[in-house]
């Protein structure tokens, strides 16, 4: 990755809250819907005595962003994002094109995603169809942006992370 990566440790309690903050931030940049083409924004889980989600942003004009946080967690997340070692990408080049059902080859051609890894199924080939559910959140791993997918009904695959997960112990 190139350019400055800024980290924001704002006490978000979950990824949905962090993504909401990013959406509000984006609204102040431009009347054009969606993130700028080169923008990469990630979420990072922070464990320990104060669990939370830190946000990192790269590829945006730093003058258009709020000042970065000065916490150790924000600095660590920014370093991991910059190195391509960690970060759950919310915005990345091509994310707006990843809607509906599309072949893996198309996903790889139109977006910054480098690889699709299928859990519990055969490897994804170029013609394997992915039901994006309009919610694609790849993660950085070893300098590559990897989308983890699982087998889905109808011979498709789908992103492992679902848009509206059922909370743990929801039936209790």
Image (cartoon, rainbow, N blue to C red):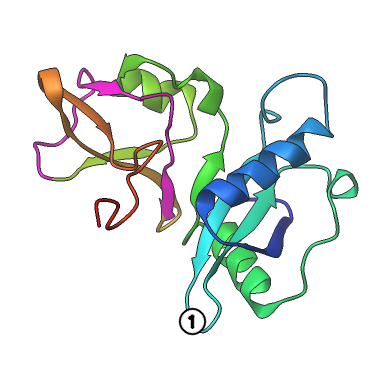
- Does residue 79 show up magenta in the picture? no
Report the residue at 52% width, 61% height from top: 44
Q: Is residue 144 left or right of residue 18?
A: left
Q: Which residue is under mark 1?
A: 48
Q: Main secondary structure of the magenta part?
A: loop
Quarter holding the C terminus is: bottom left
Residue 41 point in image, percent of width and height:
62, 46
Residue 98 point in image, percent of width and height:
45, 22
Residue 141 point in image, percent of width and height:
39, 56
Residue 39 point in image, percent of width and height:
67, 38
Q: Quadrant of residue 145?
A: top left
Report the residue at 62% width, 74% height from top: 73
Report the residue at 54% width, 41% height from top: 90
Report the residue at 68% width, 50% height from top: 57
> Which span is picked out in magenta?
120-140
The correct choice, above or below, for 83 with respect to 35 in the image is below
Query: SS for tag 1?
Result: loop
Q: Going by the picture, which residue comes out furthest to the bottom? A: 49
């Amino acid at each position: 990755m190139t350019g400055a990566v800024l980290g924001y440790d704002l006490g978000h309690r979950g990824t949905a809250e962090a993504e909401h903050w990013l959406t509000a931030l984006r609204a102040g940049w431009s009347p054009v819907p969606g993130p700028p083409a080169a923008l990469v924004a990630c979420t990072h889980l922070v464990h320990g005595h104060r669990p939370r989600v830190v946000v990192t942003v790269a590829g945006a004009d730093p003058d258009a962003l709020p000042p970065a946080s000065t916490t150790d967690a924000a600095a660590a997340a920014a370093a991991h994002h910059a190195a391509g070692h960690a970060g759950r990408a919310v915005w990345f080049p091509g994310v707006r094109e990843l809607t509906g059902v599309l072949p893996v080859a198309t996903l790889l051609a139109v977006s910054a995603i480098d690889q699709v890894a299928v859990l519990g199924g055969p490897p994804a080939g170029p013609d394997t169809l992915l039901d994006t559910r309009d919610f694609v959140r790849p993660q950085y791993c070893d300098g590559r942006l990897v989308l983890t997918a699982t087998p889905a009904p109808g011979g498709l695959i789908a992103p492992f992370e679902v848009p509206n997960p059922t909370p743990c112990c929801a039936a209790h």
